[in-house]
Amino acid sequence: MLENNIKKEAKVVDNEAYKERFQFLLWVNDNIICQRYFKINGFNNDSLRSLEFKETMDNVTKMIKDDLLSKSRIFMWYTREEPIKMSGFLSNYDGLEQSDILALTSANYEGNIQLSNGQVINKNYFSYPEGIDDSYYDREKLPAWDVTFKFQMLIDEEAVYEHIWDGTVYPKYVRNGVDLTNSDILYRDKDPSSLHFSYAIIHHMTHGKIDLVYHIIKQICEVMSYKFEDSNKYTKRMKYGDRNYILSTYNKDWVDIARQSCLEKTKAYMNELAREEKYADTFGLTPGQYEYIENRL
């Protein structure tokens, strides 16, 4: 598996010329599986301390999670351990009883099925012989959090947003083949019925899906350059109950309280420095203090 079987060192690519201040990363355990650099025209630093930035980044991670969840459901449907229905299909189920629909669709019923209207349907299944290994079926049961996904947003190589979630909930095939672009390069201009199963399953998992990389960058650029000439357009405070919270690691209220608590000490220190400068000729002592010491020595 990707998260355990990568042994050789990754080839180092000199991409200094392509680097920008802004980038996002998607990790599976210690492996970077997606990295994109991009520009933000009119970047507004105030966005980093806003509710809008937090909500946008949460939505970005939700887009990725929803994409992986959708692909997991599709993959599991096509690789589920059930016999393949060969006959017993109807083009129209209208007017049938629920018991008829259950008998026609459930693998528990096979052979001649008599419907409530008297019609007899012959339903047969194809099952793989015992002993044949299904390489696509995921029998691996990992402990929770044995595989983790991590999304990061970086500015000047420093993380400004990070979200980590459990990756063991996705099938091994899905988490080992993550493609946020949802590229159709493997099946483009090909008849889906002619594809090898490995390509066909990718077709079903990605067909009609958007390029998440483009939309992730678009959303980030929009929120981080929003009204860049007016920082007050961002929501920087939130109220819960009767208390206001500042959405920043820099809390101006706390800084003001700390500054006030040190004010008297700062004044005393500055006065001491001014006195030493004023009476430098007498080593920082007033003439009276200096004369008193001279007379006592």
Image (spheres, helix red, strand yellow):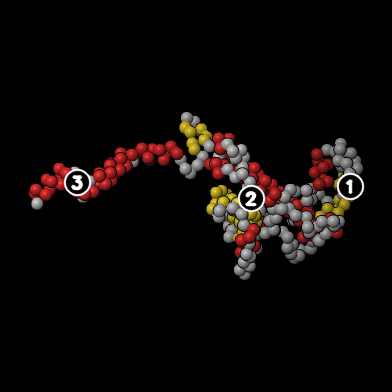
Q: Earlier in the sequence, mark 3 or mark 1?
A: 1
Q: Hey, what amino acid is under mark 2?
A: Lys
Q: In the rendered view, does 18 fall on the left or right side of 197?
A: left
Q: What element carries label 3?
A: loop
Q: Name the residue under label 2.
A: 39
> In the displayed image of the protein, which residue is found farthest to the front?
281
> In the picture provided, is 7 more to the left or to the right than 242?
right
Determine the CA span between mark 1 and mark 2: 62 Å
Compare residues 64 and 89 and report the one nearer the observer: 64
**SS category of the residue bearing label 2:** loop
Label 2 or label 3, whichever comes before in sequence order: 2
Q: How many labels does the image show?
A: 3
**Residue visible at 28% across and 46% down?**
273
Q: Do the residues labelled 3 and 1 touch (CB within 8 Å)?
A: no
Residue 73 in view in this figure: no
Say the numbered circle drawn on residue 285.
3
Identify residue for label 1.
Answer: 121
Residue type at the position of mark 1? Ile
The quadrant of the image that shows the N terminus is: bottom right
Residue 60 x %, y %: 64, 46
Q: Nearer the viewer, residue 259 or 62?
A: 259
Contact between marks 2 and 3 (CB within 8 A): the answer is: no
Which image quarter: residue 55? top right
| Residue displayed at 43% across by 37% down | 253
Q: Nearer the viewer, mark 3 or mark 1?
A: 3
Dot label at residue 242: none
Mark 1, other Cα within 10 Å: few <14 / some 14–19 / many ≥20: some
* Front-lying residue, 276 or 168: 276
